[in-house]
Amino acid sequence: MKHFSTLSFRPLLIAVMVAVPVFGHAQTPDSNTLKGSQAEMRDQFFDRVLGHDTGAWTPEQVKTMAQLRDAALTDSYALDELRHLTFNIGPRLSGSPQAQAAVEYVAGEMRKLGAEVTLEKTQVPHWVRGAETAELVSWSGMGPGTTQKVVLTALGSSVATPKDGLTAEVVVADSWEDLKKLDPASCAGKILLLNEKFDKQLAAQEGGLYSYGESVQYRGAAPVAGALMGASAVLVRSVGGADYRIPHTGETEYAPNVKKIPAAAVTAEDADMLADLVKQGPVTMHLTLTPETLPDATSYNVIADWKGTEHPEQVVVVSGHLDSWDLATGAIDDGAGVVVSMQAIHLLQKLGIHPKRTVRFVAWMSEEEGSEGAATYIHDHAGDVADHIGAIESDLGAGHPDGLIFAGKPELAEWLRPVTQVLDGIGASTLHASPETGEDIAVLTEKGVPSFAPSQDGRFYFNYHHTPADTFDKVNPRELSENAALMTVLSYALADSSTPAPR
């Protein structure tokens, strides 16, 4: 998950944070759509309240949705696939051998299911982390001959320091407002720390995307801001709620005609220490970062089609991104999204279900470093966007889903009501309107394709996202199964409805 715009550093899914709930399982039906005589409208009312109105699906199709939902809850396929991706393959940074191994593995698993597999070639960044160390070499009250270690990690696409590192005084700004007040002369040649804090209380009360949206802009724009102030390097306070002194990586960006300076994220604990010491007097740090940006590499989106029986040219995308950052094994970002999408194909195959339209699994490549895979897909499929009936992406981990996020016409809410009644069986019946649903399907959304994402419990996601703690044990098997159920039911519903989703 990257979540900021290339040009404005705007959090991509900020819309999710302000999404308005359309309805939940306690909402009354829309009386404006009741038509006919008093008796007919009464029957319509109770059909909707009791879930008997099946809308664009027959009662048999609704039963199939329930069958898929229940099968997902007892099937270990997604969990087993996630275990292999994380334990056997490991981190999957774009351009790495592990990313290629993941492509080959997922393609092979889809072929085993009988899906029609295509490897869609795309060129991706190939950035290699290298060494990353920092220590304080002078500060107020230091003991003779001592240093203090600072825990940090390079931000994605960062340039390197000199091979032997650089030594400079540290200057701290807590916000853009504080930075603007500084005299650029006070930053010249120094290491600038941007110390914007991740709001843990807000994350606990409202979900992590609210807090992340406020903080991630500093990670994205830090090198440009630091260079414009004359700094020799820039640090950001880690974007997330992680304790235990672990740093949070992620993509950063440079601007044309602005000098590129090294960029790293420090742990919240070390950011607090630096801010305190700087108030006491001058603080000098020795910083070494040795990342390399190699020539772009060839990689692939994995596409697997479960062909439709009546309209195979019409497709419903069910997807997650296969690449991950390299500090951990990418279990929640976004191994979980990949495997619950894989399970949609697995359950259709296992239960012998063949919808009218094609269900297209996509494992996107390089979402974290620029969404090159998504750009390639939209280029290669520019002529058949009209045949994309719907697009689903899971890229917010594996927390309990409470329902669906959708982007498209308001009529989608009523159209999806029978689906949410099925999903009420796992507590996932709410709908939330949003202009955007996922980084990789964003262009499809912009072109009018109805798009969707699970609405998930995000209170703890940013404790682990992009950190060394994004590992298999952070995934709750039951909640992973609930997400697989949602993805499978929705992809089947979109693919087998009597009429396509409104667009």
Image (spheres, rainbow, N blue to C red):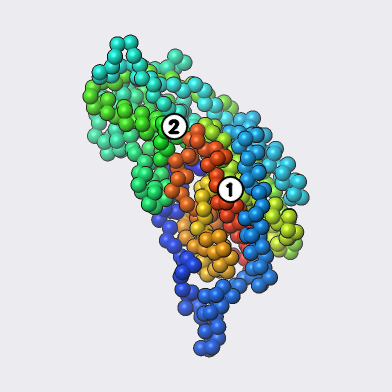
Q: Which residue lies under the disc numbered 2?
A: 246
Q: Quadrant of residue 349?
A: bottom right
What's the residue type where badge 1 is placed? Pro
The CA distance from mark 1 to mark 2 is 25 Å
Give the residue at mark 1. Answer: 477
Earlier sequence position, callout 1 versus callout 2: 2
On the image, the x and y values in percent for residue 466 come to 49, 37
Q: Amino acid at mark 2?
A: Ile
- For the C terminus, give its image quadrant: bottom right
Residue 460 point in image, percent of width and height = 45, 45
Q: Residue at x 60, y 72 (%)?
A: 55
**In screen coordinates, is 80 left or right of 113?**
left
Q: Residue at x 73, y 55 (%)?
A: 350
At which x and y percent is residue 88? 65, 34
* Depth check, front residue: 478 or 383: 478
Q: Is residue 268 above or below residue 49?
A: above
What x and y, as percent, mark residue 264? 42, 29
Tag 1–tag 2 contact (CB < 8 Å) = no
* Secondary element type, mark 1: helix
- Answer whether residue 389 is visible to the viewer in this image: no
Relative placement, left or right, of 361 versus 35 is: right
Left of 448 or right of it: where is 83? right
Q: Residue at x 47, y 45 (%)?
A: 461
Residue 94 occupies which quadrant of the picture? Answer: top right
